[in-house]
Image (cartoon, rainbow, N blue to C red):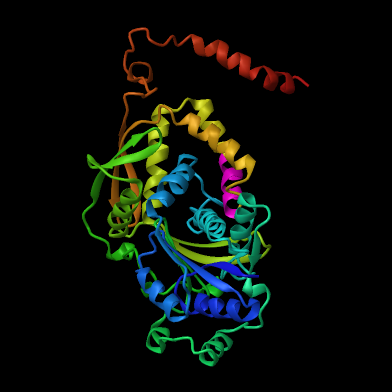
């Protein structure tokens, strides 16, 4: 083993992994740090990598690619896992895997490595996505190999190997296992391991408490083009800018908090809390514009495909052929999903208060309760009802 590309955050765990790889495999380590909107500076990771003697360091701003090529396509599908989870962690993993493999090919590395533990879904997601891109890639998962099984053992290893530990930061560190990107921030561990205990209010970082949110509602107009938001209140923004803006606007109104027990792919149940302000608005607004512009059966077919689509993403099959097949169908359905949705943000809630489109299939003339001037013949309903009632009548005759 000559060279390994490591997904490197600059934190204590991945710094220990970098040293462990050097020692265990006697190899050169290449670090890769991505900015996907986690809200923290990534440049300090460069300084830490340099201090560890690492020569090849990749730091990349992937926010636009993440929003454009991963989050937005997923929201065209209205994807939601187990009725509530908006897949914030799941959708980030394929992009990281993709870049790890691409960098490995660029630098001639023998393997890639990551810091995900075996208890969660991320080992599965990282590795399935990597193998989908390069069937021959070697993957090193330290948590499957080493004997550093506790926070204490990690700290001892750091001390023994002169890995800088910011003890002040460690003492202030959140007790939760956290993951963040443009779409969400997640919290697991500590008191959340008891599903009965309510999360502490100071755990939440992106949203105010709904009880403390402003007493006045805020209205937004979201413009859509072929299923994607392109403008907020008439201002054109890039996909990443749209997500950043909606996170701030919705978070200020206490929107996007979630507390669930989910079924992990590896078999166990896990309790987690999530903040997804932008995603919460995006899901509701997208369904609103589709309600005007999608044919009924096309919309219902999308709803039938969605649980399978969401499960594939959750389990790590973004690059699987069946996900790509479904994406092609979903994208085709968005051809006329264009228009504007008006939403109201108020104390933890997103309400749809208006929608319009020049591609609308809604006909006020036909739908009206007033005189439609013959646009709809009431007698037509009789034959429709009798045809659909035939099998029910036959059953009742037995």
Q: Is residue 263 above or below residue 194?
A: above
Q: What residue is shown at x 28% (from left), y 41% (from top)?
A: 231
**Towards the viewer: 227 or 387:** 227
**Picture coordinates of residue 60, whole percent (x, y):** 40, 60
Q: Main secondary structure of the magenta part?
A: helix
Give coordinates of residue 41: x percent, y percent: 34, 69
Quadrant that contains the C terminus: top right
Residue 13 in sight in this render: yes
Give the camera-side residue of 220 and 183.
Answer: 183
Vertical placement of residue 377 versus 77, above or below:
above
Coordinates of residue 8 in the picture (x, y in percent): 49, 69
- The N terminus appears in which quarter of the rendering? bottom right
| Image location of residue 380, percent across then percent down | 50, 10
Residue 67 vertical position relative to residue 192 in the rendered view, above or below: above
Say which residue appears at 24% left-offset and 46% top-offset: 219
Q: Residue at x 34, y 49 (%)?
A: 350
The image quarter in which residue 307 lies: top right
Q: Could you say which quadrant of the image residue 75 lies in?
A: top left
Asked if residue 185 lies left or right of residue 19, the reply is: left
Camera-side residue of 106 and 34: 106
Furthest-right residue in view?
398
Which residue range is magenta in the image? 306-315
* Residue drawn at 48 percent across, 30 percent down: 333
Residue 311 magenta: yes
Magenta span has 262? no
Left or right for 94, reference 231: right
232, 288: nearer the viewer = 232
- Residue 191 seen anywhere in this rendered image of the structure: no
């Amino acid at each position: 083993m000559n060279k390994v590309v490591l997904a490197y955050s600059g934190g204590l765990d991945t710094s220990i992994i970098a040293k462990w790889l050097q020692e265990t495999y006697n190899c050169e380590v290449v670090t890769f740090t991505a900015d996907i909107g986690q809200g923290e500076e990534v440049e300090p990771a460069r300084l830490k990598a340099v201090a560890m003697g690492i020569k090849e360091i990749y730091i990349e701003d992937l926010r636009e690619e993440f929003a454009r090529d991963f989050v937005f396509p997923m929201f065209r599908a209205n994807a939601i896992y187990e009725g509530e989870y908006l897949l914030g962690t799941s959708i980030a993993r394929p992009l990281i895997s993709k870049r790890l493999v691409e960098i490995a090919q660029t630098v001639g590395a023998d393997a890639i490595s990551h810091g995900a533990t075996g208890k969660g879904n991320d080992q599965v997601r990282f590795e399935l996505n990597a193998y989908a891109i390069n069937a021959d890639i070697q993957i090193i998962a330290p948590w499957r190999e080493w004997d550093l099984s506790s926070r204490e053992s990690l700290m001892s290893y750091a001390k023994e190997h002169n890995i800088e530990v910011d003890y002040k930061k460690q003492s202030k560190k959140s007790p939760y296992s956290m993951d963040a990107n443009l779409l969400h921030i997640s919290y697991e561990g500590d008191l959340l391991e008891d599903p009965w205990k309510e999360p502490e209010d100071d755990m939440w970082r992106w949203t105010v408490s709904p009880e403390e949110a402003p007493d006045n509602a805020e209205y937004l107009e979201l413009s859509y083009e072929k299923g994607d938001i392109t403008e907020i209140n008439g201002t054109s923004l890039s996909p990443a800018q749209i997500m950043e803006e909606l996170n701030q606007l919705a978070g200020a109104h206490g929107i996007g908090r979630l507390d669930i027990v989910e079924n992990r792919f590896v078999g166990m149940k896990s309790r987690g809390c999530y903040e997804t302000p932008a995603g919460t608005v995006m899901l509701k607004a997208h369904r609103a514009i589709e309600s005007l512009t999608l044919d009924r059966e096309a919309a219902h077919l999308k709803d039938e495909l969605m649980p399978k689509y969401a499960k594939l993403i959750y389990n790590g099959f973004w690059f699987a052929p069946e996900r790509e097949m479904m994406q092609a169908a979903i994208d085709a359905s968005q051809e006329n999903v264009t228009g504007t949705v008006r939403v109201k943000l108020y104390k933890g809630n997103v309400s749809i208060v208006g929608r319009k489109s020049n591609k609308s299939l809604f006909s006020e003339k036909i739908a009206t309760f007033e005189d439609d001037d013959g646009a709809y013949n009431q007698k037509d309903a009789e034959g429709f009802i009798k045809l659909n009632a035939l099998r029910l009548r036959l059953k009742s005759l037995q």
